[in-house]
Amino acid sequence: MLGKTAASLFWMSRYLERVENSARFIEAGFRIALTRSASASDEWSSVLKSSGVLQAYRRKHVDFDSVNVIDFLLRDRDNTNSVMALTKKARDSARTARTALTREVWEATNESWITLNAAMAKPVREQDLPETLGLIRNQSALVRGATLGTMLRNDGFNFLRLGSFLERADSTARILDVKYYLLLPSVALIGSSVDNVQWETILRSVSAHRSFRWLNGPDISAQAVADYLILHRQMPRSLTFCYAKISDNLNYIDDNYGIKSRSGELAHEICTDILRRPIEAIFDYGLHEYIADFIRANNGLAAQIETDFNFHDRVG
Amino acid sequence: MFDEMLGSGDDVRPPYRDYKSWLDRENVKRLHRKSADAEAFFRKTGITFNVYGEDEADERLIPFDVVPRVLSAREWRKLSKGIEQRVRAINAFLYDIYHRQEILRAGRVPVELIANNEAFLPQMIGVNPPGGIYTHIIGTDIVRTGDEEFYVLEDNARTPSGVSYMLENRETMLQMFPELFARIKVQEVSNYPGQLRRSLAACAPPKCEGKPVVAVLTPGIYNSAYFEHSFLADQMGVELVEGHDLKIVDGRVAMRTTEGYTAIDVLYRRIDDEYIDPLNFNPQSMLGVPGIFDVYRSGGITIANAPGTGISDDKALYSYMPDIVEFYTGEKPLLENVPTWRCSEKDQLAYVLEHLEELVVKEVHGSGGYGMLVGPAASKKEVAAFRAKLIDNASNYIAQPTLALSTVPIFTKKGLSPRHVDLRPFVLVSPSGISITPGGLTRVAMTKGSLVVNSSQGGGTKDTWVLEE
């Protein structure tokens, strides 16, 4: 397969994953804005930070008014990571990789762009937000369903999956990076303002508040939340889960090509060095430093994949 | 005015009888619904094209009309024989013009027409393209003015587009009206991609080892015909590459894959000559591959169509086509040329200037309906502006009478209504012969009375049927 095609598949699924994560973030933020208006500004600020667009937002707006934040995240032309911009980029990538996609996957991606374009042609009113977010979720589900249901399990499929899980790991890590202070034991000791709702919001932004309860009952603790997002093997947005998938897909590619790639080794190192520590050790090391290490390693792996599989022409 | 369904009167012409009797019994509402379905289908599938000069985000649908254009087997035989003859002559002409230039020595085509022509590539002199084929793919534009009157309007011998619409239009019709195809036997078009791949592979270069590796070269996703490029690559099962995917490695043109560089044997390029090689042609080009032309000359790759084929469909040469056909085939042309005035010649220019309001005037190097004047449809002001351009650079233009193009009905809100059409059959040339897919792309001017069928000017398309014997 062409290096460019692999790159387009990889980025197409990163963009799609990012769209879905944005919808989740907005949903969690909107809930806070509705239920605890006093914390709304802080929450929107964290959402923008987790999405990596806080600076861009600040250049345009002074306060964190829900309407402005939502419009910025969904459709503002000045936001290169808005849901609309990302959907367009995903579709452009899919067009570039058109010959490596099944008709079903291409059509689902194309329709998602057409549908969301129409739904977001005008600013989304607050009363329509839940419906719009639902639409975004549905469109993602359609693309994912078409991918799982129709794609040949070849290297193209593996690059799609690598994109999804690298992006997802990055997103989960970013939430932890922005909100780590809520999970520090020292805060719990002070025992003051941080409460279940804050922790629940973290879980909500990875759509894990329900599954967390099923596994842990009504008791919620900072350490349990961190453990769930970082180390849980079955939670589909945990760092450990994502890395199990990343390793698998790199192994498939290596087997298929008959090579031992540096990316495969790197993924293995991340699994053993970073993700196999018990949660207590992570807290001893420092949650914030730990997450920063992980984000750096995750970015390093993405760069290594680009190099190993000739995504770009190397100069010289 | 000749209507292909109704002739000049009210009697349905024989090729349309079965279809018309089906249509007359159809529920009009159902047809309207099907028309809307077709549009949704094209949009969903992404069968769109970008219009130059408009917002990059603006992708348009080419309007599709549900009424097919029908040709009888006899009509098709006549057409395809004429096209085949013309295509043979074009390849012979190209070989000659880049080798001994016998036709110039014989005085049948003026030397200055070649010497001063930008479409003539001196770099191709003495080059022997693999398999001896210059034009692997040709789209011959045909217009009709009566029962037996067909004319060749243009020989698109560079990188003709539209074949994906021919294929998708048929797919759409099969999905929408399966019962029609059970009742009326229409010749198949769907094996075109397979034939294209075989015919490209048959022209592999001397340095090819093993099974020829074929690829399609596109300028990228913002090109107006990108849909077609990806469609053809996909249907042939070959890679779709851009210039930056390619590099010269060990004297071959190779594509960058996830496992390293792989040599390409046959490149079906969908970019113009000028852009394919910044080292040998336009140094500004970002689309091509530096050095590809040197690899080509050393037998390391086949470029389809060969560089320099543009000289054969140049509009300045068009009026010489009957001579060219006769010179190389020794036969009278089976298909006629449209009478043409050469504005480069003084007396002919004088005639053109006098009759601008009745004529169609075209730029010699233009395509896609850009920069042309349709006299009868133009305002006084437009004619005056064009006159100035024409006087300023006369040799840049040719003129033709405004032909009364045949019409075929389209399905409008108010029912059937005649619209002018043309036809672009697609021709594949390989060492083992010439094959023409029965039918081709029918383009239709969607505006009543309009003669401009180009999709870039709002034209639409129809499925084209050639009936079984």
Image: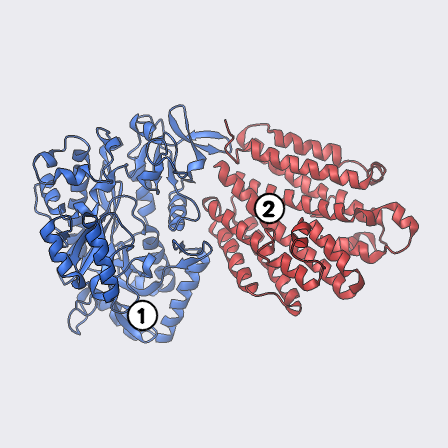
Chain colours: A red, B blue
Q: Position of residue B440 (x, y in %)?
A: 27, 54
Residue nearest the viewer, comparing B79 with B198:
B79
Q: CA distance from mark 1 to mark 2?
A: 44 Å
Chain letter of the residue beneath label 1 in the structure image: B
Q: Residues within 10 Å of mark 1 (few under 14, many from 20)?
A: some
Residue found 66% across the figure and 70% down from its top: A127
Left or right, B153 with respect to A224, comes to left
Q: Residue B2 is drawn in which quadrant?
A: bottom left
Disc number lying in front (1 or 2): 2
Image location of residue A153, percent across then percent down: 54, 42
Q: Residue furthest right?
A: A190
Q: Residue at x 72, y 38 (%)?
A: A294
Q: Residue at x 21, y 45 (%)?
A: B314
Q: Judge by depth and name the residue closer to the eye, B196 or B396.
A: B396
Tell me the residue at 78%/65% (across/down).
A35
Circle 1: residue type: Phe
Q: Is residue B175 left or right of residue A73?
A: left
- Residue B338, can we see it? yes
Residue type beneath disc 2: Arg
Q: On the picture, is B295 further left or further right than A194?
A: left
Count of all numbered marks drawn on residues in the image? 2
Q: Is residue A314 above or below residue A14?
A: above
Q: Which residue carries the number 1 mark?
A: B411
Nearer to the camera, A51 or B279: B279
Check the image and name the residue furthest to the top: B250
- Neighbour tally class for label 2: few under 14, some 14-19, many 20 plus, Cα within 10 Å: many
Which disc, if any, is residue A14? Answer: 2
Dot 1: what SS? strand
Residue A151: percent from the left, percent from the top? 52, 46
